[in-house]
Image (cartoon, rainbow, N blue to C red):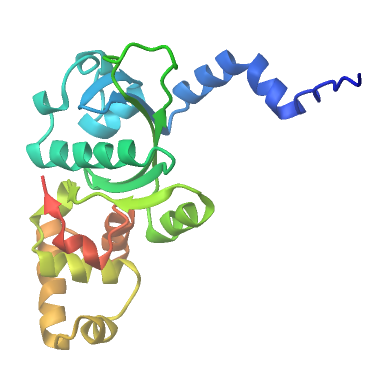
Amino acid sequence: MMTHTPPPPCPITQFLIEHAGDLCTALVAEPSTGITVITADGRWVYMNAQAAEILFGPGADPSRYVGRRWSEFMPPEWVEDRLELNRRMLAHPERPVMLRVIWRGQQHFTWIRRIARDADAPAETPELLLLITRRSPSNEAGEELTSRTAFEPVDSSVMNLGRLDVLSPRELEVTALLGQGLSVKEIAAILHRSEKTVDHHRVSIYEKLKVHDRVALAEIARAAGLKVEDAERRRV
């Protein structure tokens, strides 16, 4: 009888197996990457320092949030948005998600994947999801990320605009287009408004944000990855 020897693991697979601990440590410590593990019903199980700062600001201590429910710290609209996404992912676990969100005035992309449960895990074992978050200023960078990933792109229905929150929805639209380098005339054509109206918005935007030129405004808009359609999202 012929026997078949299984092929050896490929070099990269063998490397990952042998160095899983080191790789995990390096990823968690990477200064621009937030790592979070959550339960599907809205509790933080693990959070590195970077993830805490993305959500709560500089100096946030992850130990304050681990083991706690989202509803204790986050706006109800945010909790509702994330729980709905979790339910969707559990219904289709084969489709991981890449979530785009503007939070504290900055654009972030979060890769979300369900963590498979052990076959013999008790029925009451909570469903877990792994989240990897990276800041990605500008729409160009975001579009490159979405084009290179097999994850399903999803836009959060809620946002925290940071300093941009002083702007009206119409001013946000104009800011998004000014941030792309478009002229008042071009913006007027896209938004179907008069040039006079667009210029009035431009002046108001400068005053509210306390900026004095298009370069400074573009930096703020690009940090948020601001798009015209963001003007209609819920603010928290």
Left or right, 152 with respect to 215, comes to right
- Relative to 22, residue 128 above or below: below
- The C terminus, quarter of image: top left
Instruction: Reply above or below: 189 against 96.
Output: below
Answer with left or right where residue 214 lies relative to residue 20: left
Q: Residue at x 38, y 60 (%)?
A: 139
Q: Residue at x 67, y 14 (%)?
A: 18
Q: Residue at x 28, y 59 (%)?
A: 226
The number of numbered discs placed on residues in the rendered structure image is 0
Is residue 213 visible to us here? no
Given residues 12 and 49, the one toward you in this image is 12
Q: Is residue 69 visible?
A: yes
Where 173 sits versus 63, above or below? below
Q: Quadrant of the N terminus?
A: top right
Q: Quadrant of residue 199?
A: bottom left
Please tell me which residue lies in front, 172 or 211. Answer: 172
Seen at 22% across and 14% down, the residue is 67
**Residue 71 in the image, given as x and y percentages of width and height:** 11, 27
Report whether 168 appears left or right of 85. left
